[in-house]
Amino acid sequence: MSHDCVCDGILTAIGSHNRTLLPWHNRGGSTQRRGGVFVRQSPNLGITIFLYVAGILLVMMAVVLLLQSFGVLTTIPRSAIWALVLLAIGSGILAGIRRRA
């Protein structure tokens, strides 16, 4: 049984045609009503990829700063910083594309 069938069954059971009552229905995109049919719009792929890249970069940089503050890393070569940035960009692109599929 698909997720939409479950939602439709619940809506029929409670007698409501307003899907905003169901909190899990809006995950991953906005829902608009068109002619009595609800259409789910997926978020823009470029925005999704940008947000993944930015999030991964923030987490990586936070880890590096923590390691530096505890004295584990004293100096970081410029090539290692570039490697982390490229890793974050590649991971963000793959995560955004995987989420889209």
Image: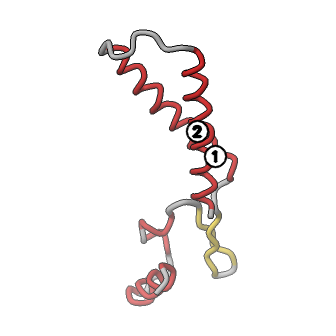
**Image quadrant in which you'd find residue 71:** top left
Residue at 40% x, 10% y is 74
The residue wearing badge 2 is: 53
Q: Is residue 27 above or below residue 67?
A: below
* Residue 35 left/right relative to 18: right
Q: Considering the image in quadrants, where does the C terminus appear?
A: bottom right
Q: What residue lies at 58% left-to-right and 35% top-to-bottom?
A: 87
In the structure shown, which secondary structural element does the residue marked by tag 1 occupy?
A: helix
Crowding at label 2, few (<14), some or many (≥20) Cα neighbours within 10 Å? many
Q: Amino acid at mark 1?
A: Ile
Residue 77, image x, y percentages? 54, 14
**Residue at x 62%, y 37% (from the top left corner):** 89
Res 52 quadrant in image: top right
Q: Amino acid at mark 2?
A: Val
Q: Nearer the viewer, residue 59 or 5?
A: 59
Q: Which mark is residue 93?
A: 1
* In contact (CB < 8 Å): disc 1 and disc 2: yes
Q: Position of residue 68 (x, y in %)?
A: 38, 15
Q: Nearer the viewer, residue 56 or 80?
A: 80
Q: Which of the colour schemes (rainbow, by chain, secondary structure, one colour) is used?
A: secondary structure
Q: Is 82 or 97 nearer to us in this picture?
A: 82
